[in-house]
Amino acid sequence: QTVVTQEPSFSVSPGGTVTLTCGLSSGSVSTSSYPSWYQQTPGQAPRRLIYTTNTRSSGVPDRFSGSILGNKAALTITGAQADDESHYYCMLYMGSGIWMFGGGTKLTVL
Amino acid sequence: QVQLVESGGGVVQTGGSLRLSCAASGFTFSSYGIHWVRQAPGKGLEWVANLQKDGINKYYADSVKGRVTISTDNPKNTLYLQVNSLTTEDTAVYYCARDQGWASDIWGQGTMVTVSS
């Protein structure tokens, strides 16, 4: 069965740029996968950051951007801040009404 | 205020059943699709099920197919998730989330389901 892959962890310095990716164990991510990205801090519900590849949700700072890089979806944080330290999840549409989350990336800002 | 509120979680024994509720306010939920997503303690998010905004088409993850059913009560603006034959692997916080723009824009606070053996 195809799974959605994300880096388990990533580290970025304050003010730095980091790109998290979201791929498929088999196949490529495209805009037809409708990739979306979510931020989750401990004990809280997820918050949508990006949807349909690169549309920023209302109220999300413009340092967050989404794209397709090669055969993966990507979330780039430009000018990382301390409160960006969170777990980040991507969600992909797999077809036939089925959706799937990646395993999540724990981002550390230090 | 646009919000979703889940309820119905609790402690249940292996093999038991639960019906989770997702009450919508501030919008007409029959105009949107709704996802159920769960998160086991210390683990990532897992997509569980989806009711499309047509109110007819329902889809389930392989991990729960055959044990889970979505239903609705439109006058109450409420969606339900019936989960049967519970195992310890079903222990998780269960979230409902509104589907908008091919993604989940509004999330509830979650309801905890604990399955004990």
Image (cartoon, coloured by chain):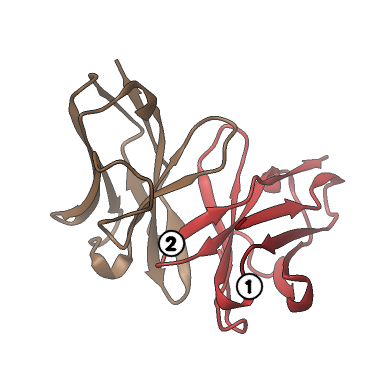
State left or right for residue A58 relative to residue B113: left
Residue A36 pos. (x, y %):
36, 55
> In front here: A103 or A20?
A20
User: Which numbered disc, 2 or 1, marks the residue that appears first in the sequence?
Assistant: 1
Please identify the residue farthest to the top as the structure is shown.
A110
The chain coloured red in the image: B
Q: Secondary structure at mark 2?
A: loop
Residue annotated with mark 2: B103
Task: Report the number of numbered marks.
Answer: 2
The residue located at (31%, 66%) in the rendering is A33
> In front here: A38 or A92?
A38
Residue annotated with mark 1: B28
Mark 2 is on which residue type?
A: Ala
Badge nearest the viewer, 2 or 1: 1
State left or right for residue A36 relative to residue A19: right
Q: Is residue B56 above or below residue B43?
A: below
Marks 2 and 1, how far apart at CA: 17 Å
Disc 1 chain ID: B
The residue located at (38%, 52%) in the rendering is A58
Colour chain A appears in: brown
2 and 1 marks in contact (CB < 8 Å): no
For the N terminus of chain B, which image quadrant? bottom right
Q: Secondary structure at mark 1?
A: loop
> In front here: B15 or B4?
B4
Mark 1 is on which residue type?
A: Thr
The residue located at (41%, 67%) in the rendering is B102
- As drawn, the label of residue B63 is none
